[in-house]
Image (spheres, helix red, strand yellow):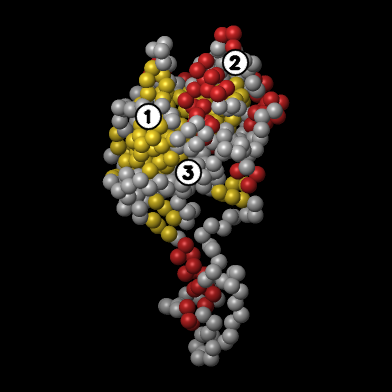
Amino acid sequence: MKKKSVAALSLAAVLLFSACGGDTPTSVHPEDLGQPIGGTETVPQETNAETTPETEDLTDVPPAEGMVHSALTNEWIEEEIANSRPIAVMYPTNKESLPQYNIGEAGVLYEAMEEGNISRQMAVLENWEDLELIGNIRSSRDYYAYWCLEWDAYLVHWGGTFYLLQTLVDHNIDNLTGAAIAAGEATPPAYGSSAFYRWPRGSAPSIHNGFTDGASLAAAINSVGYQTEHHTFYDSNHFSFMPMTEVNTLEDAPNSFSATSIDLSKIFPYSESAFEYDEESGTYLKSIHGSAQMDAATEKQLAFTNVIVQSTTWDYRPDNKYIYFNVIDSDQSGYYFTQGRGIPITWTKKDAESPTRYYDMDGNEIQLNTGHTYIAIAQDGRDVIYK
């Protein structure tokens, strides 16, 4: 895979300014460092092996003390946030539900089909406690819970099917819900329901005005008694990222092809999710229902550095209404898009708690670029259109 590096350029700049006090010479050689301009006498220079450009690692230095790489995006975040659990929020794709609040904050955004040939979205957000409005929020299905579990996140939803309840119980997944999960006599309480409300405040209940906020969620988590630090099974190396100073262009990757336009209308015929590559920002800008998908909180269009299409086998439940995906599987196909190009990939998830891993056609784990990631869970047999 072709990589662009700025580390060498940064080092060259340091050498130039060290030699000439800021003046730009026509050429500089390492042996010239330490010699006065125009002189021939060598002046001994004291060096510190820990701080000289030759030995100092300039490629991975945090901008401030106490910052580390995000497991979701590889961007710099406070260590306290990295050690805290994210939230996984269920957002609808219905036209009347748009625009939505703080969906653009998602480090990772999943989209998958549900019954009725309509898709739903799950946004994984870190640094969520200061968000003033999150939503609108809809119900969840059992397969979203598995992707939530990969990130050791709290599942934030407004009810769901009884299939979801069994998955939450089987895998001890912490959830916060605005309504109880219907399961007949086995229906449990709506854990964390105090965090949810109708917005605007005082409005009559509807399917598109359920909201929450960071402070309310934090209070509910404390009230329910959920663990706030990551569980021991959590793998912070969920994705494999390129170094921040390098870019995976995919130009030299196996079976690489141009892909500045990504059309998912065959996968999601209702939402018609699609992407256009913006070369200036190096991101894919997302549209939905033929228009830019906006975050109402920031008034910005959703943008993703990485786009993954994950082809997944599926079937109907015995009721022939609800569907399920084979989330735990191996050697299934898909695509990875970044920097205006794409490659075919395979993916594997070995058990409920393990991350989904993505590989190129040579069997190497793909290296994502630093930034936000969108993952389309495609029903096997539904194809992506790209050009």
Q: CA distance from mark 1 to mark 2?
A: 29 Å
Please tell me which residue is depicted at 49% across the width and 22% down the height of the picture. 142
Please indicate whether residue 9 sits to the left or right of residue 272 in the image. right
Q: Circle 1 sits on which residue?
A: 312
Q: CA distance from mark 3 to mark 1?
A: 19 Å
Q: Circle 2 sits on which residue?
A: 180
Q: CA distance from mark 2 to mark 3?
A: 33 Å
Residue 309 location, x and y as percent?
Answer: 37, 35
Please indicate whether residue 168 sits to the left or right of residue 273 in the image. right
Q: Helix, strand, or loop for circle 3?
A: loop
Identity, as a three-letter code, of the amino acid under mark 2? Ala
Circle 3 Cα neighbour tier, 10 Å, few/some/many (<14 / 14–19 / ≥20)? some
Q: Circle 3 sits on which residue?
A: 239
Identity, as a three-letter code, of the amino acid under mark 3? Phe
Whether residue 301 appears in this view of the structure is no
Please tell me which residue is depicted at 41% across the width and 25% down the height of the picture. 325
Please tell me which residue is depicted at 55% across the width and 12% down the height of the picture. 183
Please tell me whether mark 1 or mark 2 is closer to you in this view.
1
Q: Helix, strand, or loop for circle 2?
A: loop
Residue 36 location, x and y as percent?
Answer: 54, 85
Q: Are marks 2 and 3 in contact (CB under 8 Å)?
A: no
Q: Earlier in the sequence, mark 2 or mark 3?
A: 2
